[in-house]
Image (tube, rainbow, N blue to C red):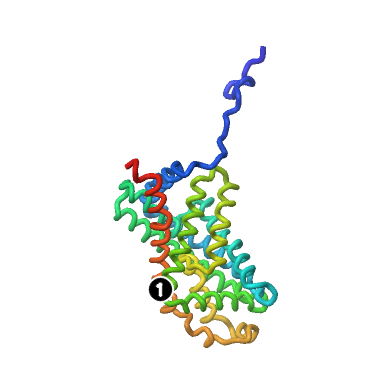
């Protein structure tokens, strides 16, 4: 007669079944509510540190995306370049989700817990403020490191030129257009986050993140945390790049005169507000009304 080893299951005991199917929509909404409560009640210090990480993750993804598409305009169609930029940029949200970081745009889904009256307005605003500031610190620190390292000079300066062109296009947006593009952006970002709530495995989470993120980048929507890197890194390049850089790209710093602090703030303010609307209303409020309102 075979005896079971102490501490181990008996050979005749069936292995527990692991459910790998995604959560159903109502269960996903309930999970989003619970996550919102935990995020809103997190202590300030870890919240800020995790937000700095998220800002750095998004900035690194932005730098990766910029590098990959640098010079591609010479031989690839516009849409393909934007698609490649989006796919590579999705690295940022993958790192945020799997690394447990705190991202302002994703945290707009705390509105689900607020709508169910599980967190107060003060707690929501506290989280958004701390996380927004932490994201900014992480993104700015990464921008400084990128410029100090001279990464923008790679490829004969084409990486830096691409960064300048991306930022120049962003600061050229009027506030209404920036606001509406930001609404659309965070609708897709929060949909990506929402889908990760339903996913049960790491692979599932990676797979569901890529398409929405690639879509918002390809369509030119505006993400506040990404812009915390894109615009400052271009401002720094304009300020510190040597004359040899401008010679290599056949341009001058005067050609990017709009890249300054005023241009940065003029973009970031409407984009932040638009992201809040897109995340809280287009995703959070709609799913709350569909799955949670009637049981409260």
Q: Residue 170: x percent and y percent?
A: 49, 75
Foreground residue among 152 and 220: 220
| Numbered disc 1: secondary structure | helix
Callout 1 crowding tier (Cα within 10 Å): few <14, some 14–19, many ≥20? few
Residue corresponding to mark 1: 176
Above or below residue 16? Residue 63 is below
Is any atom of residue 273 visible in this view? yes
* Residue 32 on image: x %, y %: 43, 47
- Name the residue: 53% across, 57% down: 93
Left or right of 222? Residue 85 is right
Task: Locate the C terminus by quadrant.
Answer: top left
Q: Residue at x 54, y 75 (%)?
A: 166
Residue at screen point 44% across, 59% down? 105
Q: Is residue 6 above or below residue 102?
A: above
* 174 displayed left or right of 230: left
Tell me: residue 187, above or below residue 235: above
């Amino acid at each position: 007669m075979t005896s079971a080893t102490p501490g181990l299951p008996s050979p005749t005991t069936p292995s527990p079944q692991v459910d790998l199917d995604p959560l159903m929509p109502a269960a996903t909404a309930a999970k989003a509510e619970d996550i919102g409560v935990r995020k809103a009640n997190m202590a300030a210090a870890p919240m800020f540190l995790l937000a700095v990480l998220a800002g750095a993750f998004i900035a690194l993804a932005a730098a990766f995306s910029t590098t990959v598409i640098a010079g591609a305009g010479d031989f690839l169609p516009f849409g393909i370049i934007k698609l490649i930029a989006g796919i590579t940029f999705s690295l940022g949200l993958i790192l945020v989700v799997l690394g447990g970081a705190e991202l302002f745009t994703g945290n707009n889904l705390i509105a689900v817990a607020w709508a169910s009256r599980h967190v107060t307005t003060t707690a929501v605003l506290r989280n958004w403020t701390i996380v927004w500031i932490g994201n900014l610190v992480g993104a700015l620190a990464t921008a400084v490191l990128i410029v100090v390292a001279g990464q923008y000079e790679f490829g004969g300066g084409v990486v830096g030129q691409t960064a300048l062109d991306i930022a120049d296009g962003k600061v050229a947006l009027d506030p209404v257009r920036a606001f509406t593009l930001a609404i659309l952006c965070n609708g897709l970002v929060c949909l990506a986050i929402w889908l990760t709530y339903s996913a049960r495995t790491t692979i599932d989470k990676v797979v569901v993140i890529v398409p929405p993120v690639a879509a918002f980048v390809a369509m030119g929507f505006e993400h506040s945390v990404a812009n915390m890197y894109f615009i400052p890194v271009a401002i720094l390049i304009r300020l510190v790049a040597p004359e040899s850089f401008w010679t290599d790209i056949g341009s001058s710093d005067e050609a990017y005169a709009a890249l300054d602090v005023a241009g940065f703030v003029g973009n970031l303010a409407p984009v932040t507000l638009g992201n809040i609307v897109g995340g809280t209303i287009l995703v959070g409020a709609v799913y709350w009304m569909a799955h949670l309102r009637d049981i409260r």
